[in-house]
Amino acid sequence: MSKVRVLVGTRKGAFILTSDGKRDQWQVSGPHFAGWEIYHMKGSPVEPDRIYASQSSGWFGQILQRSDDGGKTWAPPGGEPIPTPGPPKPISNRFAYDTSAETGAPLTTHMWYDGTQHPWEFKRVWHLEPSLTDANVVYAGVEDAGLFRSTDGAASWQELSGLRGHGTGPKWQPGAGGMCLHTILLDPSNPDRIYIAISAAGAFRTDNGGKSWKPINKGLVSDFMPNPTAEVGHCVHHVAMHPSRPNTLFMQKHWHVMRSDDAGDNWTKISGNLPTDFGFVIDVHAHEPETLYVVPIKSDSLHFPIDGKLQVHRSRTGGNEWEPLTNGLPQKDCYVNVLRDAMSVDSLDDCGIYFGTTGGQVYCSPNGGDNWKPIVHDLPAVLSVEVQTLP
Amino acid sequence: MIRVQIPYHLRCLARVEGEVTLDVPAPVTVRTVLDALEACYPMLAGTVRDHDTQRRRPFLRFFACEEDISLESPDTPLPDPIVQGREPLLIIGAIAGG
């Protein structure tokens, strides 16, 4: 029988939740890296027991961890203790923007909250995206916005500087959480095509493996900008894609839920009858490419559900027509948030939907959203949820 | 041998308990101690000082013989009790009050 493994990143460590295909009884392991912020963990689709984790701290900076046994043991790649100084080793936690003349781009400034220009500084890794075909290749989206790639299992990192060097960097600005590159989508049908999204710059696409990038924000409207339809500057919260339709993208923006059917070249609003179209997460059913999930959040000033009622909304029509899913979710006095990387789906026959909250709950629906049950109640604030479906 | 006390989270990261002892060639300074620390424990590179600027992370402080030496040059020789191993160099995580 198949199993699922849920990788949960929190403000104070990582947790791994496992169950059989019924998804009723769960085993909890953790905290791993207790006391550290775990922005994201994700397993390799090629070797599922290889899991990458982003571990960070305001005191000690960024650490990359890797497990090769499904999360039982972890080590910083290349960072094993050595008794005496030896030859230089790869440095897994060094994210140096590439400013070299050969492959890099000059380090510019970006816009700060007060409208002035601010130095571009590395702060942390928000998202890790392992390659679809090579377990040693993994991408990292970082704050301040940049895209890095490792080809040696996260032992060392090189920036794909064409993105930061796009030329519009001085117009990018941080969202409330920082100027983060939080979404990386690899096109399973075209290894040269990658989508990324930055808060607050917008979505970008490369069609040549990361050498050059184009903004794909036509159709987005952001009223907080002097020009609401500008080419860049949009606060994209998350983007999702079904692997069978890599040209169709779904976006939860700061406000508005959007859809593109031409690889991001044009976007249309699909908020429809949502009670509010502010939110952070968006995801797609594993077997139904037109079935979407969002968690409406009251507003950009009030980051909690409307009237204290936690609701997932599902559209079976690719947007516009949404239904609230509440069975098993708290319908009073609930004032948590669901952050942008904190929703995921499994690929069992009856697709499971998962999300984590800033209140420390991780909910699972083993039947596509019809019924929900908390797997855990009292973790630290959940930053990310990823699910692996295992044989 | 030079004795160094590092914060709890870095001890966990380096998988050590208690003090770290390091063989540090003269002159013994904060810089040469950190060079030796990072050479022996590569996972600590970048956690005490920035990879590129080599500047101390803002929330960490260095204490030697009950003195805060955080703002001194990293090339200032450390006091004899540290060099002779009678006292540890302390790397302390700053603690916010309130």
Image (tube, rainbow, N blue to C red):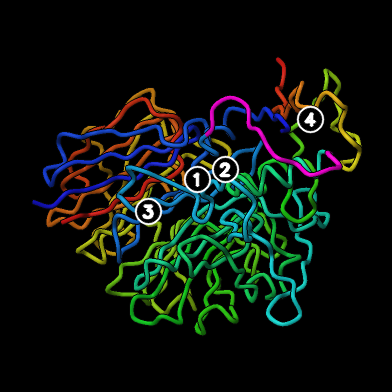
The nearer-to-camera label among 4 and 1 is 4
- Check the image and report above or below for A114 versus A98: above
Give, as a single range, the part of the protein colored magenta.
B16-28
The residue furthest bottom is A208
**Residue A379 image position (x, y, % from top left):** 39, 29
For label 3, the SS is strand
The residue furthest top is B98
The residue pinned by badge 3 equals A51
The nearer-to-camera label among 1 and 3 is 3
Give the amino acid type for the residue marked by disc 2 in the picture: Ser
Q: Is residue B21 magenta?
A: yes
Give the amino acid type for the residue marked by disc 4 in the picture: Phe
| Callout 2 touching callout 1 (CB < 8 Å) | yes
| Callout 1 touching callout 3 (CB < 8 Å) | no
Badge number at residue B62: 4
For label 2, the SS is strand
Q: Rate crowding at label 1 as few (under 14), some (14 to 19) or many (20 or more) other CA atoms within 10 Å.
A: many
Give the amino acid type for the residue marked by disc 3 in the picture: Ile
| Of pointers 3 and 2, the one earlier in the residue sequence | 3
- Tag 3 subunit: A
Same-chain check, marks 4 and 2: no
Q: Which residue is depicted at the point 68% across and 54% down?
A: A122
Q: Which residue is depicted at the point 83% across and 23% down?
A: B81
The residue pinned by badge 1 equals A39
For label 1, the SS is strand
Same-chain check, marks 2 and 1: yes
Foreground: B24 or B75? B24
Quadrant of the rendered image containing residue A142: bottom right
Q: Is residue A34 magenta?
A: no
Q: Magenta region's main secondary structure?
A: loop
| Of pointers 2 and 1, the one earlier in the residue sequence | 1
The nearer-to-camera label among 3 and 4 is 4
